[in-house]
Amino acid sequence: MELRHLRYFVAVAEAEHFGRAAERLHVSQSPLSRQIAQLEDELGIELFLPAGRGVKLSPAGRNFLAGARATLACAARAVEDARATAQGRIGTIVIGFDGALADTLLLPQIVQTFRAHHPNVEVRLRPLPSEDQLAALRDDKISVGYGYHSPDDNPLVRYRVLFRERVGVVMSRSHRLAARRTLRVADLAHERFLWPPRKEGPRLHDDIIAAFRAHDHTLELAHEEASGEVLLMLVASGEGLSLFPESTAPTLLAGVTLKRVRDLNVTILGRSLWRAADDKDPLVRSLLEITNSVHAPRRQ
């Protein structure tokens, strides 16, 4: 049984006449009659009964009509859904993001713009450390990853640098160093720093430790299982200092300030990451295009 058999059957049932049904279908009456006969042979039942110059549905035909219409409607929806998916009008996209990106305000702008362009697409956000995003892409757990540091050369993935910027020190406005315009690493000796556990960003963690050691200073880190906003509240309360991208300065809490450390050469590289096989995926392409328009690369 093919879909055309069902279309022909429904047309005859609605027209109650083979000739009128053939005109509606733009086919000759003889092929239409043969198709209906084939359908009846396959089902082993009589679908139509003679009725004057036309036909009417048999009891079995009336019962079959509802199912035939439902099947055709389901097939039509499947075709439309497939086209909509291919055009990026529906579907699901899963975004993996390093939690530290919340401090840059990058991701909220991207997601809001994407949702405005694709109101019928489900967007799932999955917090994921940068180091875990490559494996998540490989296992098809995320569609695009946003994080820090470029991956090693891999022909199966693509990435784009979104920004490079220095790390600055954040402190309470009442701190003894808050009045200084810029600082040096030596000024931060013996200060207590609040920083997430190494597992949440091992590469950046190690870069910062190494940068202080290069100046013969050991960084005292107090690990906090906290978001960026909570860390800033702790800093504002005088619990210690922290390190944030310099671009976050305009968005910091009222009680804190960010200072450039002139000889602390720690640079954050933000990037997007996706599968090479998804270069032509309409949703991935749209998300990446929006990313590019919302956050053009800048050099610091």
Image (cartoon, rainbow, N blue to C red):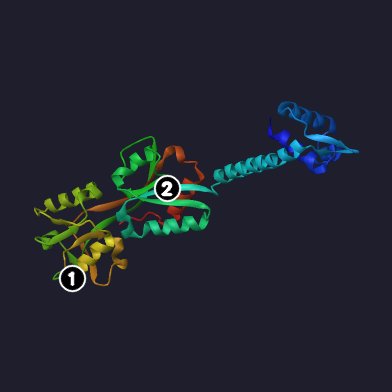
Return the residue nearer the eye: 179 or 282.
Answer: 282
Q: Is residue 56 depicted above or below 178 in this figure?
A: above
View extreme (front): residue: 59
Residue located 50% across and 58% down the image: 116
How packed is label 2: few (under 14 Cα within 10 Å), some, or many (20 or more)? some
Residue located 80% across and 32% down the image: 32
Residue at which label 1 appears: 178
Q: Is residue 7 depicted above or below 203 in this figure?
A: above
How packed is label 1: few (under 14 Cα within 10 Å), some, or many (20 or more)? some
Residue at mark 1 to residue at mark 2: CA–CA distance: 41 Å
Q: Secondary structure at mark 1?
A: loop
Return the residue nearer the eye: 159 or 198.
Answer: 198
Residue located 19% across and 48% down the image: 206
Q: Position of residue 124 (x, y in %)?
A: 42, 51
| Number of marks in picture | 2
Residue type indicated by callout 1: Ala
Label drawn at residue 94? 2
Q: Quadrant of residue 100?
A: bottom left
Residue 34 appears in the figure? yes
**Which one is earlier in the sequence, the residue at label 1 or at label 2?**
2
Residue type indicated by callout 2: Val
Q: Secondary structure at mark 2?
A: strand
Q: Quadrant of residue 156?
A: top left
View extreme (right): residue: 52
Nearer the camera: disc 1 or disc 2: 2
Return the residue nearer the eye: 13 or 90.
Answer: 13
Q: Position of residue 2 (x, y in %)?
A: 68, 31
Q: Position of residue 6 (x, y in %)?
A: 72, 36
Q: Quadrant of the C terminus?
A: bottom left
Residue located 58% across and 46% down the image: 84
